[in-house]
Image (spheres, rainbow, N blue to C red):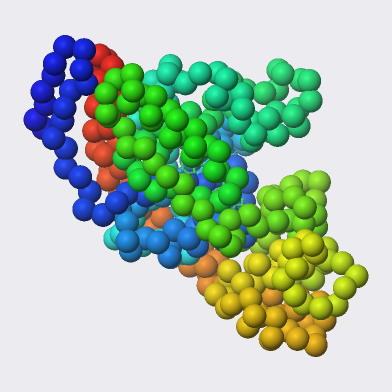
Amino acid sequence: MATTTAPGAAPQEVRPRPARPRTFSGIKPSGEPHLGTYLGAVKRWVEMQDEYDNFFCIVDLHAVTVPQDPAALRRRTRELAAFYVAAGIDTAKSTILVQGHVPAHAELGWILNCITPMGWLERMTQFKDKSAKEGDNRERISAGLFDYPVLMAADILLYDARYVPVGDDQRQHVELTRDIAERFNRLYGETLVVPEAVIAETGARIMGLEDPTQKMSKSEDLPGQAIGVFDNPGVIRRNVMRATTDSGREVRFDPSRPGIYNLLTIYEVLSGESRPAIEARFEGKGYGDFKRALADLVLDVLTPIQERSRQLLTSGEVDDILRQGAERAAPVAGATLLRVKRAMGLA
Ligand code: TYM
């Protein structure tokens, strides 16, 4: 690789550019993946993957910012990888990797820590929400939880990703990634690609089924809040039928009725039908009929994904995919890390 180095300036490298723009995104294997992660992230990745050069990550190092049972973490990491493939991520077009298999993530994370002001991290709403759950008990909040968005910035920046397809709750973290990249480039010369979040208009914030004012996530307090992508059909059907709605009857997209609005949004994203078409389909029918149709639709989508995931897990195919993914990702990440280290005088 050709480099020219002037004193005090970042080395100029002639580096091969990917033919298609890069995307990077990831999911934590800290809980079971649910319909929110599918609709806000994985389904979008599948739809976008032909146009880009994609890296989709299972971010295990992010999961351990809160305590994890080791066996469960290992199991969920494989399951999440299987889910990506079963949902339609094609390894001919996209690289699937486990974050911890590529050590450059942690190394760049450390380096970026050193240029990220504490004040920027103190403003992160997700950290504020998560740490608030521990009340005043600061012994229970890890430094990793505070520092988490810097590792996320490292994930994205290592791959020169231009686009980061995420749900709405990650917008602030991608903004921070931009700030970190811009600050690095100001301090050490143009080195890092400044990425953009790609957030869908519909489906980027799927709400919970029990409490539709809260984002869908697996919650111990509200067991029916999320539809796990690996839940069995009986559980899925029951949770959809029990979803909180209101005393109305009309099946209409009305944001002032958050329960039915959220269920309709799920229907819209899963079916790909327009809002008027969906409203026409359920005209004169009640919430019960609509919920039954929604449960059928969810099962139509998830059942084949569950079956394919099981095959990938039992055949061990998923382990080969992850091994190959790390082999493909490591040189790309390593090249960026070297660029960064050279720019800073670390190499
Ligand atoms: P995580 O694991 O919480 O969520 C993974 C992805 O799913 C989206 N998502 C949702 N979308 C719609 N409705 C919901 N209810 C819902 N819940 C989750 C999230 O917005 C996200 O896109 N910090 C990230 C993981 C990460 C990452 C990265 C993402 C680490 N490094 C680099 C992108 C790029 C996280 O905790 O996502």
- Where residue 327 sits: x, y (%)? 28, 43
Instruction: Identify which residue is drawn at 69% across, 53% down.
Output: 216
Q: Nearer the viewer, residue 247 or 83?
A: 247
300 displayed left or right of 235: left
- Where residue 149 sits: x, y (%)? 52, 31
300 displayed left or right of 155: right
Instruction: Identify which residue is drawn at 61% across, 31% down.
Output: 124
| Residue 276 in the image: above or below residue 203 | below
193 displayed left or right of 276: left
Where residue 104 sits, quadrant-wise, is top left
- Quick one: quadrant of the N terminus? top left
Q: Nearer the viewer, residue 315 or 169?
A: 169
Q: Nearer the viewer, residue 285 or 292?
A: 285
- Where residue 90 sits: x, y (%)? 36, 62
- Disc tally is 0
| Residue 99 in the image: above or below residue 39 | above
23 displayed left or right of 59: left
| Residue 303 in the image: above or below residue 139 | below
Specify the farthest residue to the top: 7
- Quick one: quadrant of the C terminus? top left
Specify the farthest residue to the right: 247
Q: Is residue 103 visible?
A: no
Instruction: Identify which residue is drawn at 77% across, 57% down.
Output: 212
Instruction: Identify which residue is drawn at 31% across, 32% down.
Output: 192
- Where residue 185 sits: x, y (%)? 32, 26
